[in-house]
Image (cartoon, coloured by chain):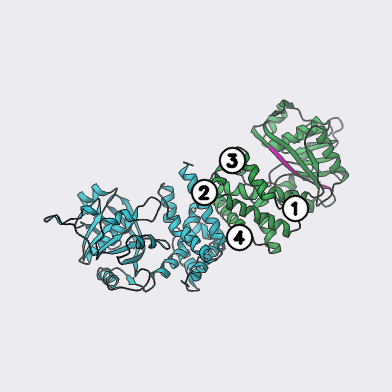
Chain colours: A cyan, B green
Amino acid sequence: MKVLVIGTGAVGSYFGFKLAQSGAEVSMLARSDYDHVRDHGIHLSTTEGDFHFQPKQVVRHAAELVDPESGAAIKPDYVMLCIKVVEGADRIGLLRDAVGPETAIVLVSNGIDVEREVAEAFPDNEIISGLAFIGVTRIAPGRIHHEAYGNLSLGSYPHGVSEKTRLLAEAYQAAGVKCVATDNIGTARWQKCVWNAAFNPVSVLCGLNTGDILAHQEAFIRTLMQEVCAIAAAVGHPLPETLVDKSIHSTLKMPPYKTSMLVDFEAGRPLETEAILGNAVRAGQEVGAAAPHLETVYALMKLKQAAAAKGG
Amino acid sequence: MKVLVIGTGAVGSYFGFKLAQSGAEVSMLARSDYDHVRDHGIHLSTTEGDFHFQPKQVVRHAAELVDPESGAAIKPDYVMLCIKVVEGADRIGLLRDAVGPETAIVLVSNGIDVEREVAEAFPDNEIISGLAFIGVTRIAPGRIHHEAYGNLSLGSYPHGVSEKTRLLAEAYQAAGVKCVATDNIGTARWQKCVWNAAFNPVSVLCGLNTGDILAHQEAFIRTLMQEVCAIAAAVGHPLPETLVDKSIHSTLKMPPYKTSMLVDFEAGRPLETEAILGNAVRAGQEVGAAAPHLETVYALMKLKQAAAAKGG
């Protein structure tokens, strides 16, 4: 199994490494971290110990992925895009030279409806949609710190489990990753969005961690989550009735923490606001599912980001 | 006409000075600025020139307001409370020793339903409710900078125009203040709240001035304003249908500026969130007028203030 992982951030590095552990031939496409990763590979400090991961090849552009002897272009069985879906991220451009006729495109990212643009650009390729549940951080170029979890959900887009999806999931399982192949990854995306669309933007708007937010405004967070559930149901992805309760309870059980979006905001990095919140709000508007609390949070996030862009 | 103005901030200083210009005998109660105002009076730089205002007496507590010869307590005809309605402001305590049986209490402040607490504490006194429309800033103790406007609306609480209200309005008019005595000050409060409840909290949550807010999210601001209008109508204060349009247009015509609440927030001062936004939301909830966008802004303001209190 030949794989190109695009993105040497925390998620790409960790799940590229795990796939290599399963015996796959894994190359990495690095952008800002290219020099370091080419020279030193990737160092991972994980809950199971420290590891060094030397990718098969490290490239800066997909066109550089060639057989070293013949110079012939390599088109991998899977190209796995592990970058955040943010403004300015040219996902199609990054994929263009990596994808051959038989290449399956694997999209590992948060958000709703993030596959459509890629599926439209590569109408003849299989799209596999993935969700990572993991606490992992890139602490420096080529240095990854893994703190908790490490689960992966994979499903063929828009639904089903293809042969290629099943084989990828089995490779991860062979490396000890709790990986499930799901018939309906769209529903899984909405399910994850319930937490993300509520906590991530609210944390950015007020600058508080999960524990403080719940201590002051648990009912408000529940309202936001319920609006996401209502939109999901209206667009054909009904979620379990107990989901909001369970999300709140599991968050209360964890130590309070800063959301990844607040961490990104404080670091001045672009945010996944559109993928997580904007797409959910628009999905609701298309089917007439009212979500006034989410819409308000979305409008305020746009203003907050306009202020940040202005240097405020 | 004997008057005690409580508060030597921008509004108290300006409208105390104007009343003195009309010939009234105006004393001032100063808190943090006491030493300076006692020794130097108040200097006003206004659109009509620079003025020095020496109050009849300057006191730190209302009990100090005594006839200098006889030592007898003076109970003024009007006690005018010109402080912001914020957490920790002990309005009843400030008024207690100032109020005699014939004293009318004048409340000049923003917000909805800010009279009730005072009316309940002084059930036998006349309450006059006031709204200032003025661009005026306290730039240092006893130093006031007046930039624009200078209008005052006065009305008896809960409605009507009493003899004392009429006399006070005439005193202001004699000093050149555009002062109107209105039969329904409650409606006037809701009308002013339409702008305040939308722009003030949103500016704090995103850190933008009025121009930037409208450039990015005019429709959202209109939605918030319409919710305030709907609540006002539901509690018996129907507002003109053209009000939202007019508020937007007049804001667009003015140079972009930081709201007073954003200025207060950045200076670490307490905010009028409850008086302006919380009371409006609660009034809506009491009569079942849905205002989900306002409720969301209110929940986020509570979180933002919790973060600020935590030192965030």
Quadrant including the N terminus of chain B: top right
Indicate yes or no whether the magenta region holds residue A68: no
Q: Which residue in the protein does label 2 denote?
A: A303
Q: Examine the residues drawn in magenta and state their main secondary structure.
A: strand
Q: Is residue B129 left or right of residue A66?
A: right
Answer with mark 3 or mark 4, whichever residue precedes in sequence.
Answer: 3
Q: Which residue in the protein does label 1 denote?
A: B117
In the image, which residues are magenta?
B125-134
Residue drawn 76% across and 53% down? B116
State the separation of the CA atoms marked 3 and 4: 25 Å
Dot label at residue B292 = 4
Tell which tag, 4 or 1, sits nearer the viewer: 4
Decide which of A110, B157 is in the foreground and name it.
A110
> Residue A307: where, in percent of width, then height?
50, 45
Dot label at residue B258 = 3
Q: Are marks 1 and 2 on the same chain?
A: no
- Give the structural element (helix, strand or loop) at label 2: helix
Q: Chain of mark 1?
A: B
> Residue A204: where, in percent of width, then height?
48, 52
The amino acid marked with disc number 1 is Glu
Q: Are marks 2 and 4 on the same chain?
A: no
Task: Please identify the quarter of the rendering in which residue B26 is found.
Answer: top right
Q: Is residue A234 left or right of residue B274?
A: left
**Location of residue B101 with respect to A132 vertically, above or below:** above
Residue drawn 73% across and 46% down? B91
The amino acid marked with disc number 2 is Leu
Tell which tag, 1 or 2, sits nearer the viewer: 2
Q: Are marks 1 and 2 in contact (CB under 8 Å)?
A: no
Q: Is residue A233 left or right of residue B272?
A: left
